[in-house]
Image (cartoon, helix red, strand yellow):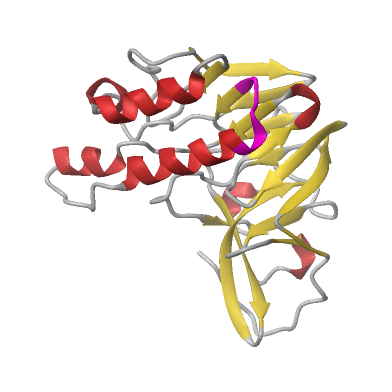
């Protein structure tokens, strides 16, 4: 997925645990967890939780460690407690398959109800879970609009300005201390945002992959990489690939 070349990058532009940006004129905070917060609208956005992925694989006879849902929900609880949003938007592939929400254990269901208490919860339908959620708080929709932004699962070539999407799980590769390092990232040119996956057992697609062709003005595209303890913001031209 990544064709690496041995060249040195220009200095990294910012090094912070959060990064404040403007997205189509709307103030946004990119968080190290992979969540995005819109402070003027008290809205928290996450993408591609892929809850119950381990259970979905088990139903197909492939065993994965069964801790993915608990770990993802605990991380979400922490970021909800930190920002105290009034609205939570999850950008699709909330569950790894169509029956994930219906078969989810009571413990995890209670965790979601606890986070949703006193808040609006918007579940965007994804390609893994196109039928919405079962017996969970909030609404399931294909798209959601707020403050001139449109939230959907899959990015669309026809709609660029103000689009916030997931699906592609963007990642990017940089050279650090003579080593190539690949990390999940927020990808934005200031008009469109493609969010990193929030789920703990999901992979990433390199930002230079052909799937991203035409989605961004590359001269303005910045990858906000999720490091171990900080965010690194790197212009597209300085990425390896």
Q: Name the one closer to the observer, 3 or 124.
A: 124
- Residue at the location (15% across, 37% down)? 59
Q: Name the one closer to the observer, 94 or 120.
A: 120
Percent position (x, y) of residue 220? 84, 51
84 in magenta: yes
**In the displayed structure, would residue 150 be above or below residue 10?**
above
**In the displayed structure, would residue 109 be above or below residue 60?**
above
Q: Name the one closer to the observer, 66 or 75.
A: 75
**In the displayed structure, would residue 118 be above or below residue 192?**
above
Q: Which residues are magenta?
A: 82-87
- Residue at the location (74% across, 83% down)? 8
Q: Quadrant of the C terminus?
A: bottom right
Percent position (x, y) of residue 126? 46, 28
74 in magenta: no
The residue lying furthest to the bottom in this view is 178
Percent position (x, y) of residue 42? 72, 25
The residue lying furthest to the right in this view is 25
Percent position (x, y) of residue 208? 63, 59
- Residue at the location (25% across, 24% down)? 106
């Amino acid at each position: 997925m990544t064709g690496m070349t041995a060249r040195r990058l220009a200095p990294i532009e910012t090094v912070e645990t959060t990064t404040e940006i403007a997205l189509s004129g709307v103030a946004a905070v990119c968080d190290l967890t992979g969540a995005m917060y819109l402070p003027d609208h008290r809205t928290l956005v996450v993408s591609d939780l892929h809850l119950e992925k381990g259970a979905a694989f088990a139903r197909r006879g492939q065993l994965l460690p069964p801790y993915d849902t608990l770990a993802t929900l605990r991380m979400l609880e922490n970021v909800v407690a930190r920002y105290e949003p009034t609205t939570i938007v999850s950008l699709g592939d909330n569950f790894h398959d169509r029956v994930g929400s219906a078969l989810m254990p009571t413990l995890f269901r209670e965790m979601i109800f606890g986070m949703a208490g006193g808040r609006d919860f918007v579940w965007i339908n994804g390609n893994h879970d196109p039928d919405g959620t079962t017996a969970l708080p909030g609404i399931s929709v294909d798209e959601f609009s707020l403050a001139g932004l449109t939230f959907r699962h899959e990015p669309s070539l026809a709609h660029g300005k103000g689009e916030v999407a997931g699906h592609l799980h963007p990642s990017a590769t940089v050279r650090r201390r003579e080593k190539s390092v690949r990390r999940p990232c927020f990808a934005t040119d200031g008009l469109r945002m493609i969010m990193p996956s929030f789920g703990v057992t999901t992979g990433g697609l390199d930002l230079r992959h052909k799937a991203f062709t035409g989605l961004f003005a590359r001269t303005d595209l910045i990858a906000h990489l999720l490091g171990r303890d900080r965010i690194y913001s790197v212009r597209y031209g300085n990425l390896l690939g």
